[in-house]
Amino acid sequence: MASSWMLVTGGSVIDGTSPSAVEGASVLIRDDRVYAVGRDLDLSVVPRAEPVERIDATGKTVMPGLVDAHCHMTYGESRFEEEIDLYTSHERRTLIAAANAKKVLRAGVTSISQPGGSYFIGVGIRDAIADGLIEGPRMTAAGRYLSTSNSLTDWYPDEVGVPAGNLGVLTNHVHEMMSEVRHQVKNGVDFIKLADSPLGEYQAFTGDEMKAIADLAHQLKRSVTIHARGSAETEAAVDAGFDWIMHGNAMSDEAIGKLAGTGTPLVPTLLLLSNLADFGAPFGVPAPLRDGCKGLLEVSADSYHRAHKAGVTFAMGTDTGFAVTPYGEWHARELELLMTYGGLSAMEAIQAGTRNGAKMLNMEGMIGQLTPGAFADVIVVNGDPVRDIRVLQDKRNIQLVIKDGSVVEFRDKEIETRWTHDRGLIYSLEHMTYDRVFGNGEEDVAGALKTKGWNMARIDIPGGDPENVPFERDAITIAPGDGRELAAEIKPRHS
Ligand SMILES: [Zn+2]
């Protein structure tokens, strides 16, 4: 059968492995693979009868598609943990995840790894993408996080327990851990994810438990990773033979030495913390959470700079999937954050966001680099990310996404529409006291409305700064009343 050929010409090519870009180079693609890269490519290798699709990338950057090693397709842009764990049927969650996969691709992310999510939705989405049933980045998936009662994910009171939709599964005993690993492998996961303590307060799994899980996962030909923010659990996981570590925010020199010595990659996943801390106020992120994230980022900067100096391998992860990290919006910001908080150069950050993520996809050498034989996942970028890494963050600069050697078509509507999980059962966001409704002519919304003979409660968010209210006045529609009636529909600015 005839091959299909594509030639991306004249760009500044970052191949994901070389220390610098090659100006005025071309990438020749045969079917789904990179065939050759360089200046003055010899096109006589292409049979005469086989046409070559030419793409002019003069003045642009041509680089491997990004690899996001920490992307939760099942979270559905949730605002509350309950929206991830409790609300929305798994059928609808699956359909939403399927629709959102295309948005990730639009951001130039051609591969993702999902380190945990509810049910086996990740496995289904992965297979549907691989089969061409839906369009999205190539993908690997873990199942529900293995957790203990002291881990992330067992957050509800005991009488609620850990419901079936929860992103974690409770395994307090080694035999439960073993059983869950076997069950997840049977159901098609690529790797096992453990949840240790939420913020690195302590080590939630014992070293022996980690070792037992890692040994069984490896015996069953699967990888294993862990949410480990503290030094103790990071070190224990490396000792137990975990394949890569998520976070490692607070690490001793010993823990860093073990990561570097074993070549175990670290996926810091700074984006979620940074979006919460840097941009959270106007979106209703509570002040204590913002401050907590800021504190954790300061600690992380120290750990990551030391880790970078020690030669630890970094990969890009984003924790995309929350309302503060929507699909396809912020993935490439992680590269800037790796530079800020880890001291990586722009090219090192790009390699963290491309080649270094291949391990989490089980495709080392096959993705994240533009070298002969690798899969032709290519993005054409308006701008030079080596000079300014931020050009990758604006998806208008991602001019072309090529996956498996084919240009991906996008429709604006499917990229712009947001499909969220069912929202929590909210009755109000504030206390509706008599005084706030009729009392004191308070400023702002209430004051303005009073002059029109309407009454309106002032709106703000518990724990939020009043000036950082996540609602816009013009998004509030008021039904005129007789001065004593309150009828309002309140729409969040971003939902
Ligand atoms: Zn995560």
Image: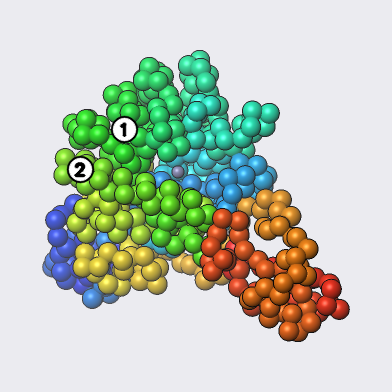
482 up-or-down from 367: above or below: below
Q: Amino acid at mark 1?
A: Ser
The image shows residue 229, relative to residue 352, as above or below, that is above
Report the front residue among 111 and 403.
Answer: 111
Is 81 in front, or is 124? Answer: 81
121 and 400: which is toward the camera: 121
Measured along the vertical axis of the image, is residue 413 above or below residue 20?
Answer: below
Secondary structure at badge 1 equals helix
Element under label 2?
helix
In x, y percent, where is residue 210? 39, 22
View quadrant of ligand 1: top left
- Residue drawn at (52%, 40%), measured in percent from left and top? 117
Q: Please name the residue shown 67% across and 32% down the image.
A: 160
Q: Which mark is residue 306?
A: 2
- Where's residue 490, x and y in %? 69, 68
Tag shown at residue 231: 1
Neighbour tally class for label 2: few under 14, some 14-19, many 20 plus, Cα within 10 Å:
some
Residue at point 31% right, 68% down?
391
| Three-letter residue code for mark 2 | Arg
Instruction: Kindly identify which numbered label has been placed on residue 209.
Output: none
Image position, residue 430 (x, y; %): 68, 58
